[in-house]
Image: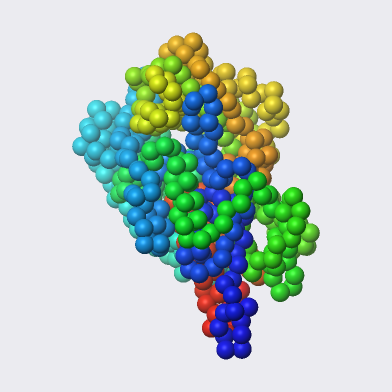
Amino acid sequence: MLGNTGTMKRRPAAAIIGSGFGGLAAAIRLQAAGFRTVIFEKRDLPGGRAYVYRQDGFTFDAGPTVITAPECLEELFALAGRRMRDHVTLVPVEPFYRLFWEDGARFDYGNDDERTCAQIHARSPGDVQGYRDFLRYAEAVFREGYEKLGHVPFPDLWSMVRVAPQLASLASYRSVYRTVSRYIRDPHLRQALSFHSLLVGGNPFTASSIYTLIHYLERKWGVWFPMGGTNALVGALVRLYEELGGELRLDSEVASIRAEESGVTGIELRAGGLEPFDLVVSNADVVHTYERLLGHHEAGARAARRLKRMRHGMSLFLVYFGTRKRYPDILHHNILFGPRYRQLLGDIFDRGVLPADFSLYLHAPSYTDTSLAPPGCHAYYVLAPVPHLGKADIDWESEGPRYAGQVLSCLEQRVMPGLTDDLVTQRIFTPRDFSRELNAHLGSAFSLEPRLTQSAWFRVHNRDRRFRGLYFVGAGTHPGAGVPGVVNSAKATAGVVLEDWRGRWAGRDPTP
């Protein structure tokens, strides 16, 4: 790799396992920094959880639909001297969400402070000042948790100790719901201001109050939608990556990561063949990486056993469907709260009970972009949180169609009258599909559950300490799930990769 003078004989080669937002962001950063990178993707299309389905003239984004913090995405294009707006069009979604309760109450939450406070006043006048105080708290958490720490790795315990006073001052040991409840008294408003941690796989009753920063993040940068769907944003990142000279290989599942005492040496493909690489960045599930890709090494098997003892986030049940008409009560993003809140989440996260009642997220992207459905039709997806496979042993092959019928019936009764007669097409995605298609441990949709004792240094590290040259990006490493989280994980990881390899380029080995 290096001559006696410390100069490079060739560019270092990096294998990126997985083409989700984290893998793409890491590949773009490393390719722009002078590495030769190859992304290996198991599926036939890029995007990972941000896959896309095209069926009967409808386009369905498979995964993330709430795009916040576009600045972290714009930064990727800026690395190559380009502008994101020249590659993909993002439009603001306002209000951010329409919230529904079973008693008929509704609430439009967005960036219009006057309208938001007016709705709060109409419901609970005493909570208006509490809401403003809560936003100030969320801003303080955002400054510490996102701006200062969101893209910074935690390689050792001391790095966690250094920030402990700031986190303690913000009472990060409190849960999201408990924190919201200190400011807000009305039960509906408490739900409205605490559900956000569910967007990254966290139970509001156990997730650290750090995750209240999502409120200020949304208020600061808004909620956005890429025209053409989230996978259009994936496509723009792929084009950027390939313009930089990167290589994307689809239908190329990695079977194992090869490693020796000196560190990783390359990868082996499921279809056969060994390929040498100087380093490997895994955007795959963290348990899968250690157990399946590195399980032939005792250190990999040991790491997998440790991770399997940790708490993993909930799974999801999704129905993608198209209709012949538009429903006037719903907006682009909708949250339907069920009759239970704490008890429902207890069933999902703790007791492993498949609920008969629902709290649902309903996405209606064709209300913003009509190209996603045939003329006169509309595309939707509805998401129900459910226990992961380790909590509930459910035969989803038989249960899936029945559960989909219950979910659609709930929508028909509450916000989409006549839905059964208006259906044109539908498909489902279950926890078993998360496990099978995405190699997600226990079918978890979000990897490790986001709680204080599984955050920062306690998460899988961006740079592995067992296998030199192995790095992680994505939901299982710092800072965690969600599009901003996984994109910022790539920034943290690329930073430590460059730190390591600059040492080699200078003629010395880095400290792993």
Q: Is residue 377 above or below residue 146?
A: above
Residue at figure coordinates x 56%, y 50% from the top left = 19
Q: Quadrant of residue 12?
A: bottom right
Specify the quadrant that holds the C terminus. Answer: bottom right
Residue 232 visible at all: yes
Q: Is residue 82 above or below residue 385?
A: below
Image position, residue 142 (x, y; %):
37, 54
Foreground of the two, 289 or 241:
241
**Location of residue 125 by image quarter:** top left
**Relative depth, front residue between 202 and 417:** 417
* Residue 133 shown left or right of residue 17 in the figure: left
> Is any atom of residue 495 visible in this view?
no
Q: What is the image's colouring?
A: rainbow
Pick the residue in front: 320 or 307: 320
Query: In the image, residue 99 lies at what x, y percent?
Result: 37, 29
Task: Quadrant for the N terminus, please.
Answer: bottom right
Q: Is residue 52 left or right of residue 192?
A: right
* Residue found at the far bottom of this picture: 5
- Residue at the left extreme of this rendering: 114
Q: Residue at x 32, y 40 (%)?
A: 91
Residue at 72 percent across and 54 percent down: it is: 269
List x then y, in percent, for residue 93: 33, 37
Q: Nearer the viewer, residue 271 or 498?
A: 271
Q: What is the count of numbered marks? A: 0
State the image quarter where residue 333 is shown: top left
> Is residue 189 rendered to the left or right of residue 286?
left
Question: 45 above or below 334?
Answer: below
Q: Indicate the position of residue 254 as horizontal and vertical percent values.
A: 69, 53
Residue drawn 48% across the image and 22% down it: 322
